[in-house]
Image (cartoon, grey):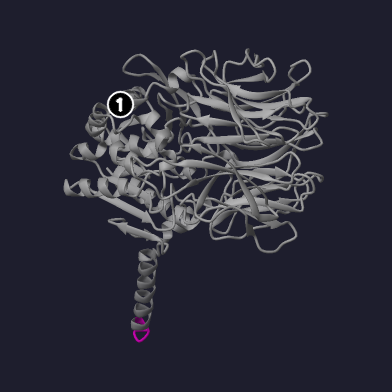
Amino acid sequence: MSKTLPVMRLLLLSMLSATAMADDAVLAPPAALVMENVPPVPAALASQLTKYTEFKPTSFTDWHPTKQEMLVVRRYKNTPQIYRVAKPGAPLELLTDYAEPVRGASFQPKHGKFFVFIKDSGGNEVFRAYRRDVAGGDAVPFTPDGQRVQDMVWSSSGKQVVYVTVPVGRTGSADKINSTIAIVDPLNPDGARTLTELPGGGWGGFKFSPDDKQLVYGEFVSANESYLWLMDLATGKTRRIAGKNGDEPVAYSSTLFSKDGKGLYLVTDAGSEFQRLAYLDLKTMKSTVLTADIPWDIDGVALSEDNKLLAFVANEDGTSVLRVMRTADRKLLPAFKLPKGTIANFEWHKDSRHLAVALTSATSPSEVYAVDVKTNAVTRWTEHEKLDIDNSKFAEPTIARWNSFDGKAISGFVYRAPAGKFPGKRPVLINIHGGPEGQFQPGFMGRSNYFTDEMGLALIYPNVRGSSGYGKTFLKLDNGMLREDSVKDIGALLDWIATQPDLDASRVAVMGGSYGGYMSLAVSTTYADRIKASVDIVGISNFVTFLEKTESYRRDLRRVEYGDERDPEMRKFMEKIAPLNNAAKIKQPLFVVQGKNDPRVPYQEADQIVATVKQNGTPVWYMMASDEGHGFNKKVNADYQFYSTINFLNQHLLAK
């Protein structure tokens, strides 16, 4: 007996040592990530989180022109790719397999033997267009290398494509660019010809007339101001057909020709706070509003091939409502029984009967449905593969409303932790959307459900002033010198949190991406004593340096929103409010995430705030991806960012 004790002791010590080694194992970060002060991710944590990272949203991209089949986008391995779906519920057939994400695709619109798509490299958003046969083979580029494609549309005949390119790599503040409008047969890339050159980078929304003799398109100055133009393709001559209403700027979008070519269907806020569906008669130039009784923004429009039905989506307080209108008498069809959620895109099949819809909800990642307008039947075309998690139990959001410093009503969506699972008041994570002309709409939270379900956090997604969806006056309330007012909306939200019996106002963190990253930094400087930590993802740290370095094709569009840094008074204001110049006020830990190839918010915005905050002695984590741009699109990078964010919040928000 005594002879066996040493052996047993050695075995026990060996087992304990192996367990300790397993507990200490860490996950190797992706090769593209360069990090400062970011602690290793425990392998056990990554394993625990896996079930929250395997969601694969599916988005619709095109119907086949002659068959009842479609193209969709879903993640394959590390990036979103193109699939074909032969019928409802059929297995998805992979058509592309690239290291980089593929952005949408469309069939050749007459026979559908090939499709076209765009992709960039490393998140640089220098999109190039490619053609590939459905039957297989190599993809063939048909737009110039090194030129960013930012709009592309098929002709009505299906023989040609019009595309818009802008030069890239120009970031000087005085740099002026032109957009090149070209037309090409994708089967003959060498035959491309330029239609015209247009000043600036704000041109898009091109659509052909039914006879392919004209193009309608938009000139976008800001979220509140745009103009409509017509081009004669035979002569190249252009004329502006819609613009301001007197001195009042007007916004136009989603413009398309009626099938007889006599008019345009479009969405506009002319004479209204909200974006309304209208018809513009091209002979009389008289505009008729078709949705005057809907007090919400209209998000997009689609016209059936037979010209009899218009589909559109109303954004009702953040929820998408699909509607179909008869063009003859402008009466609405009965509502369809789609799940409640957010509709990303929709399109008619050429049979004028079936309408494809990509829809996401709080309990389901984006899936594709088809509505039969003759029977009102709704058919689900795609189904997520089985997961090791019951997402049907994910939290549904509630709407919160609070009054800001000036009495302005602000709203947001709150996702609460499961009732009864976590005792006491819950810590809060405020997540601010980008844009700033964006809007948080309640959809599928995916991996963020870990914050509520496993960490017990309450998530709040505010729509501060400057957000879309609440009228054009609200949209302009943060422009230029009014920038800090949107930050004060978060201050009022902190006041509201303090009044809620289930929320812990002493444990609040703030997070945001792009403009939301700026907001996160601004809140960190303005309300440093009221938050515990902040996360800045591809955010702006100084509007002056941002405008001087952002790509030239978007600079003038951003100046309308943020102000012109070349104006001495505006520059002085921008420098005054810059988080970079107020970094000494950041007292709580900061996590900064950035893509090296970001053309929108250049990586220097992250570098400079990190360096300055570090000098002040405030803890700062920094994660840079060399193969990403404006946010992480590759799954391995996004996963590691997520794991590190969990670490950051556990350490700086939850720890007491």
The residue shown at (24%, 26%) is: 569
Image quadrant containing the C terminus: top left
Q: Position of residue 445 (x, y in %)?
A: 51, 40
Query: Which span of residues is magenta-colored?
Result: 1-5
Image quadrant containing the N terminus: bottom left
Q: Which residue is mark 1?
A: 484
The residue shown at (61%, 60%) is: 97
Residue in front for this viewpoint, 565 or 393: 565
The question of residue 4 being in magenta is answered with: yes
Q: Image quadrant of residue 437? A: top left
Magenta region, mostly helix, strand or loop? Answer: loop
The residue shown at (35%, 51%) is: 647
Q: Position of residue 249 (x, y in %)?
A: 48, 19
Asked whether, in this view, residue 169 is left or right of residue 102, the answer is left
Asked whether, in this view, residue 510 is left or right of residue 123, the answer is left
Q: Position of residue 243 (x, y in %)?
A: 53, 21
The question of residue 152 being in magenta is answered with: no
Residue 276 visible? The answer is: yes
Residue in front for this viewpoint, 159 or 592: 159
Asked whether, in this view, residue 315 is left or right of residue 168, the answer is right
Residue furthest to the bottom in view is 3
Q: Image quadrant of residue 35? A: bottom left
- Label 1 sits on a secondary structure element that is helix
